[in-house]
Every structure is written in C-alpha cells, then in structure tokens.
Amino acid sequence: MKTKLKISVCCLLIAFLGSCETQDNGIYMEYITGMQTLDNDIYGEKYKDYDENPFIKVADQPISTFSVDADGGSYANMRRFLHLGQTPPKESVRIEEFINYFTFDYKEPAKDENVSLESEISNCPWNTEHHLLRLGMKGLTIPADKLPNSNYVFLIDVSGSMNSPDKLGVLKTGFKTLVDNLSDRDRIAIVTYAGQAGVLLESTYGDEREKIKSAIDKLGAGGSTAGAAGIITAYEIAERNFIPNGNNRVILGSDGDFNVGPSSTEELIKLIEEKRDKGIYLTVLGVGGGNLNDYMMEQIANKGNGNYEYIDNAKQIEKVFTHEILKFYTVAKDSKIQITFNPNKIDSYRLIGYENRKLEKEDFENDSTDAGEIGSAQTITALYELVLTDKPDEEKYAQFDFRYKKPNETESRLITHEINSVPKEIMSSSENMRFATSVAGLGLLMKQSQYKGTLTKQMVLDLGRGAISFDPNGYRKEFIDLVTNWKN
C-alpha cells in the first residue's frame, strides 16, 4: 500500500535573475510551490533504482569498462528537493551526475587529440583501510570564433502539465537566454507539442533575435502530450536545415509526461538512435515536479548523443545556456573508459556511480557500441574505491585506456595513461581530488549507500570547504551552502 506523505511548502517568492520573466525590467522570480501530497513511490515521479556497483576482486575480473556520463540532471534535481526542505528520494541519486555537474581544473588535450587524461590516488576518508582513485578527462576547448554553426530545433512541451512558472516559465526564459548567445549564422526553429505537434517558428537565423524571442513569448500550455509526434516533427526540421560538420541538435524541454500516441521509452529510443546516426543529437531539459519522468528523459538523452540537465532555478538557466554553452558542441563521441588493474597492487575495486553506464570489456574496441559524449571544455570525473595489496613493489597500479571518435569520424582513437602515482593522504591531495570526494560523499549519504562507511555530513563539508579556490562561477561555494543547510 502506498503511504501518503504530505508536506507543506511555503510559497517561494525570491526576486532575482530567475526563472519567471516580468515586464521589461529583467527581474525574475523563482517558481511558486504550494501544498503537495507526495507518495512513497518516489512522489509520483518516475526514477529508475539501479543497484550499486559492488566490490570486485581483481583476481576474478581485472578489467573494468564503462561509458562516460556528461549529465548533470540528478544534481540539479537534488537541489530542488533541498530548496523545498526535503531530502531527494535515493532512487533519484546518480552519483556520477553529482560529480560531473562541476567543472574541474584539468589540463587541455595534447596536440591532435580532443581529450586529456589524468589520475590520482588518495586514502579513502570513509574507510581508512581503503583508497580512492580519481580519473579525470577534459574535452578540447574550442574558441568561440572557431565554433561550427549550430542548427537548433527547440522542442517545447506545452501540454497541460507544463502550465506553471517552474515548467514552461523556466523553459521560456532559458531558451531566450540561449538566443542571446547565438551567432548571427546559427539557426533556430521552434516546435511545440500538446494534443498534436505544431511548428511555431520555421528555422530562422540568429541575427533575427527579436523575431525568435517574440515566438517564444507566445508559448502557452494546455492539452495532452503528443511527445512522439513532436520529436518526429523536430527531427524533420533539423534534417531539412542540416549543417554539414555543424552542430545539429534538437533541444527538448519537458517534464517528461509523454502520454499520447507512441509513448513507450523503447519506441522513442529507436527513433532517437536513428536520427543520432544521421548526426542530429538530442539534449533534454527536465523541469518541474510532481510528474517528472526522470528515467525516460535521462535514457533518451543518452541514446541521442546528448546530455540531460534539470532546470530548477535562475542560476541553472545561466549555467546551461551561458556559462557552459560550449557543452552543446561535441568534441568526443562514443567515449569509453577501460581500466586494467594490476593484481600485484590492487586486491579489489568498486566503481562509484555509473551503474547504468557499464559496458562489457569486448564493447571497448567495438566501434558500433554506443557510449557517451564529451562537449567542448567539459570535464568528466570518475572515482573508484580500492583495496590495495601490501606488496611494496614499484609496478603501476593500473592502465587507463580511453577510446573516442572525433565528431566527424567513424573509427575510434585510443589514448592511454599509466596510473602510477604515489597515494596521498586525502587532505594532502589536490583540490580536484578533495572536491570530487566531497561531492561523491554527499551522493553516498543521500543514496543511503551500504558503502558509506563512517561518512558524515561534517566530513563532506571538511573535504569540500578547502577545495573551492577553482570555482569560476561559484558552483562549488553553492554546494557548500547546500550541504550546510541540508537537514539530514
């Protein structure tokens, strides 16, 4: 039987650059949330509960293979719950998305490569007998004047479930922010879907900003959700205006409530994979609560060679559409990681997060296997928890192999990195290591992980507070504030 959990949430009227536009003055307000009745079945929202990765003996399985994950949706969704005075449902927590919400201070790739690799080992703060291995990757930073032209199709859900400021309101503000960051030769079309799909704006050059914004202003919500029909129409427009060697992308904004027509996740994924192979990628923006279909949205973004972001407030709009706009330009597709552990140095290992990104070891060299994408200037981080052997020899701990394809290539490239750094005490390690460990620690606590050991909120704060000197847009400091105010 479902247990009803009623929470009272006072109205939030926070006036600052935010998610609901007022008249002409550039001032915005956060969304307003009233009384909600939440179910123990994940509050009426749809999440997929993945079992945590276990410890694996190196003697039994020395090779670990997985796809990169460039999403940040789970972290921003978590922040929504904290702002409402709630701890997020553990099923919603994907630790890799917590970590990869943040940019790390990684080096640029070597000449002729689009990705750089690095690693670091420290002791594990929540289990003093264990160690942590950090893997770091960074996509090539492309100067703004060297970026390829973009062919965007905004696919906007205007069904009845979207009729609130925290849903359609934030999307309208977000898309207008993206319009402000276009070059004159970029193109935008707008497709809406409710009871049926409609074309609100045919593909229009970026120098007609006022025309594009005027179309966005006309958006209103009502009706049922013909999600599949909208996606079909959006892809048709993207194909008609395809830019060879350009950034061709559908950007879907929705609460994920697909309920009319072909609506199974499997059918949608098949369609999206077909278009992906033609060079049209899919980015998914989730909004709102109460009926958020997080599982579907994350899956279709993965299959569409795009990323999944959740838009919960004004600062997130700025993050996605201004500070990290380069992420829309893919520099490495089908990116895969394979770690070969040395049994003389490592007894066992556990990959923290990435549960839905695991691959078979044979997939690593199979160029037909789909994997994740890395955008320009984007960093990717992964952590393993390790049990080391007591052998003092000088051998390397592991080999870090990485495969990816450049945007317009079909054959993958291999780059390698030897993991042979001397383990450090966690508080003597780099800020990159300490901050990644802090964020992973929060994820372990919120996931109620069986592997959290002696983790506490204070430990998370102690690790994070001293690792925020690299914080270009203040997101690390915001993390510390969020954890400090979390009533766990």
Image (spheres, rainbow, N blue to C red):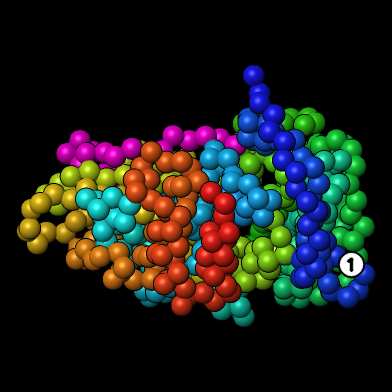
**Residue 177 painted magenta:** no
The N terminus - image quarter: top right
Amino acid identity at mark 1: Thr
Q: Is residue 161 left or right of residue 99?
A: right
**Range of the magenta residues?**
47-64
Q: State whether residue 250 appears in this view.
A: no
> Going by the image, does 388 lie left or right of 156?
left
Q: Is residue 57 magenta?
A: yes
Q: Quadrant of residue 425?
A: bottom left
Q: Position of residue 40 (x, y in %)?
A: 63, 31
> Residue at coordinates 25% horizontally, 53% vertically from top-left?
128
The image quarter containing residue 380 is bottom left
Q: Residues within 10 Å of mark 1 (few under 14, many from 20)?
A: few
Give the residue number, with chain letter if any, for mark 1.
22
The residue located at (16%, 59%) in the rendering is 396
Q: Secondary structure at mark 1?
A: loop
Classify 4 as above or below 318. above
Q: Is residue 347 above or below residue 432?
A: above
Q: How many labels were placed on the picture? A: 1
Left or right: where 208 falls relative to 386: right
Q: Nearer the viewer, residue 104 or 69?
A: 104
The residue drawn where x is 85% and y is 35% is: 224
- In the rendering, at what x and y percent does residue 331 appear? 51, 64
Q: Position of residue 130 (x, y in %)?
A: 24, 51
Q: Is residue 465 above or below residue 170?
A: below
Residue nearest the viewer, comparing 176 with 272: 176
Q: Residue 85: x, y in percent?
A: 65, 50
Name the magenta segment's main secondary structure: loop
* Residue 248 seen in the current view: yes
